[in-house]
Image: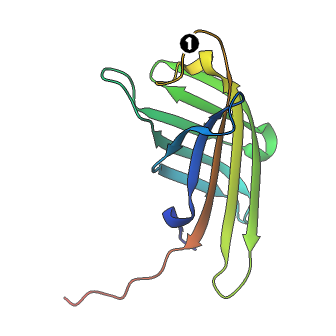
Amino acid sequence: MAWRIAMDATEATLSASTSPDPLFTLPSLDGAFYLRPGGGLAGFALRLPLPARRGEPQDLWWEAADLDREGRAWLRLGQHEVCRAVSVLCAEIPGERPYEKIVLETAFSSWSLRLPGVPLLRPRRLTLRLFTELRPAESTPDLPR
């Protein structure tokens, strides 16, 4: 079965532990989720565009493989990268239109990636969260020839 990321049910935020409000609510994402035959999440590769100042990298890459064994994900921004634990919730939601609900979360130090818009004066614990749904891709009718 083919799946698609439901962008209308997707939200990614980057928050600092010192504030209840997110630093960024990321407007979109590109990438893929890898599901095991039983429906469990095996891994993902996501590109999250960040607001950037001129000359700075704009894309935050968040990737993981073999989540059921390692439970770790890589975050990469330009030349900086960090590997941290990632919590994963992947649940099949039954119904007339079943879907997979995915929630990902990882925490890291602000010094590790030097994100744009985050002051470097003192390190902060940052949390990246993603809520999304994978829905079955609807088949398209054959086009006339």
Q: Quadrant of residue 86?
A: top right
Is 60 displayed left or right of 126 in the figure? Answer: left
Residue 98 in picture, x, y percent from top left = 67, 79
In terms of depth relative to the viewer, which is nearer, 47 or 66? 47
Outermost left residue: 145
Is 118 displayed left or right of 69 in the figure? Answer: left
Q: Is residue 26 visible?
A: yes
Q: Which color scheme did the rendering employ for the protein?
A: rainbow
77 lies above or below 50: above
- Looking at the image, which residue is at 65% across and 44% down? 129
Q: Quadrant of the N terminus?
A: bottom right
1 lies above or below 45: below
Q: Amino acid at mark 1?
A: Leu
- Looking at the image, which residue is at 71% across and 27% down? 18
Alpha-carbon neighbours of circle 1 within 10 Å: few (<14), some, or many (≥20)?
few
In terms of depth relative to the viewer, which is nearer, 128 or 16? 16
Q: Would you name the residue on which mark 1 appears?
A: 120
Residue 82 in picture, x, y percent from top left = 63, 23
Count of labels in the image: 1
Secondary structure type for disc 1: loop
Residue 25 in picture, x, y percent from top left = 53, 45
Q: Is residue 38 visible?
A: no
- Looking at the image, which residue is at 75% across and 49% down? 88
Outermost right residue: 69
Q: Quadrant of the C terminus?
A: bottom left
Residue 67 in picture, x, y percent from top left = 74, 44
70 lies above or below 120: below
- Looking at the image, which residue is at 57% across and 64% down? 9
